[in-house]
Amino acid sequence: MTQPAIFFEEVNERQGTFHRRTVILGAFAGLGVGALCARLAYLQLFETQRYEKMASSNQFNFKLLPAPRGMIVDRNGAVLAANRPNFRLMVARDKGVDPEATLHTLAEFVPLDEARQRRLLKDINSAPKRAPVQVMEDMSWEQFSAISVREPELPGVTADMGEVRVYPYGGAFAHVIGYVAKVNREDVDNAGPSPDPIMLHPSFRIGKQGVEKAFDAELRGKAGAQKVEVDANGRQVREDPQGDIPATPGKTIELTLDIDVQLRAEEVFGAESGAAVVMDVRNGDLLCLFSGPSFDANKFVRGLTGAEYRALSGYDHKPLFNKALTATYPPGSTFKTMVALSALENGYDPKTVHVCTGHWFFGRTWKCDQVHGAQDMHNAIATSCDIYFYQTALAIGPDKIADTARKFGLGEIFDIGIPGQKKGLVPDTAYKARRFPKDPKWHPGETPSMGIGQGYTNLNPLQLCVMTSRIANGEKALHPRLIRSIGGVEQKSGAAWGDLPVDKGHLHFVREAMAAVTTGIGTAARVSDLGLGPIKMAGKTGTAQAYSYGAGRGVHGTAGAWKLRDHAWFVAFAPYDDPRYAISVLVEHGGFGASAAAPRAREIMRTVLLKDPEVMKRVETVTPMPPAPDEAPAATPTDPGAKV
């Protein structure tokens, strides 16, 4: 029989164990409850503001808003690129939204053909959820109103008012200013690993060419944000204007261009293909940088159809090509100024006489357009005698000619703020060795062509205007300046690039010879009179072979097919006795420089001078203001006997 004492000891032991466990579990429970109470107290007393903000962020959202794009203006403040109101229509993919049916419904109010609907449907389906895709812009008030009143019945559809870029002067400035267009995948990829979120906004536009592209960051400004209240699904319920973050407008870009001069260049070129560049020879400011024919940049903002783009890109006059910067051509007889300066710099006597009989034999027969007889350097520049410059170039050689030409900006790319320049080519013996390893030697027979701006030599109109400006200035190695100020901050002057390392007496000689080109026996004497009394223009004509002399019919192929005709050049500065402005004009496949390029240069230069109060004061002091010449610039030679 078991003893009672033993039994009670077991019971007491079990009860003790139970009590110990109860106390331990109670302690843990008490600690847990205490910790929970402490945490609740901390959240209630110390974290209240934080969680209020988090709750508010769940209730409110911010929609990015593009900043007003900065304006682009000319030197006098005339607006060349601005913004205007734009009624837009957007569709977003969301729960309960059938994009295809929505587009079919919208097509009843705005023009959306089947092809466009298919493209838009693809964009909407590939866009993030609730991200709006722009369906149409520039809607009329009637279209905007019709959709706005039906918005409650059209989930995912938004009609609002934004801004769109506008170019008031169409094509006159298109190559310089460029245009803006929708952001594409390439733009986003080029922005780096962390692109600006505003680039994904449906109404944002990015600069694509010219100033719009080069200064896109400055023009786009800083995006703002609109505060809106949203529901649990992220849909907008209402706006909260008091919480909006204002955008910072883009900076204003002021160009050195003059709207009157640029428009006059567009007018005198008409449908012709070519370029005109005007520089202020005192500071390097570009007053005109025209390339024609051009295109309407406003159409690129809206987006071209495939047919419209093919029409532009397929036209043989190449309206999408900036001929002032990107195209290079043989400079023809305008290059003779460099040959003459090089000769003078290297001790060649300007009184040296060469007799022009219309032909000269050196390995083969070299021709001149006329029989000029005995010519010294002054008269050879005025009459543009090829025979003289064949022999002068041979006497000094290609390396010395190239060295002088480079001092005048030929073969150089200038930092004018916009991309697209072609360097061109001023050849020398080193170039020949690099370019033709199988025949690296410069042969004497290659030099005469260089002496008249042919052969390997290729330059653009901007370079030839810089050359002429440096000749006219006589002291400074001028650089062209296109951007006058950015956000009110003045940019570096084109005269702040050092002195011109050329003898001033030699420059004076060439200027005097260029003055003779437009007077007396000169090649442009009959077509370059400005009609401004004592204000005269000094210049140099040029006709450059596009193919060969036998390519078309007539002298230099001027009567043949357009693409086989020679290019017409004219460079000049005025007033010749007190230089202020320089100009270069190229008429692509225009024929003779004197009859195609010089009259256009005269009309553009007149516009420049008529706007200069000091020049006009000088004109009016001598004689009353004469009327403008009645004759229009000729597109083709009018005188078969005219000289280059």
Image: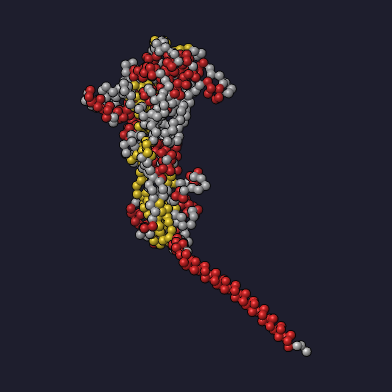
Q: Quadrant of the C terminus?
A: top left
Query: What's the residue at 26%, 23% (across, down)?
Result: 533
Q: Which of the 4 image quadrants contains residue 556? A: top left
Closer to us: 13 or 170 = 13
Closer to us: 185 or 577 = 577
Closer to us: 333 or 104 = 333
Of all residues, the one furthest to the right in this rendering is: 1
Query: What's the residue at 46%, 28% (across, down)?
Result: 412
Q: Position of residue 182 (x, y in %)?
A: 44, 46
Q: Is residue 570 above or below residue 107?
A: above
Of all residues, the one furthest to the bottom in this rendering is: 1
Query: What's the residue at 53%, 19% (across, down)?
Result: 442
Residue 464 seen in the figure? no
Q: Position of residue 526 (x, y in %)?
A: 31, 20
Query: What's the residue at 46%, 57% (across, down)?
Result: 130
Q: Is residue 142 above or below residue 233?
A: above
Q: Position of residue 578 (x, y in %)?
A: 31, 23
**Colour mapping used in the image:** secondary structure
Q: Is residue 610 left or right of residue 335?
A: left
Q: Position of residue 2 (x, y in %)?
A: 76, 88
Of all residues, the one furthest to the front in this rendering is: 5
Residue 53 seen in the figure? yes
Q: Quadrant of the N terminus?
A: bottom right
What is the number of callouts on the image?
0
Q: Is residue 172 above or below residue 464?
A: below
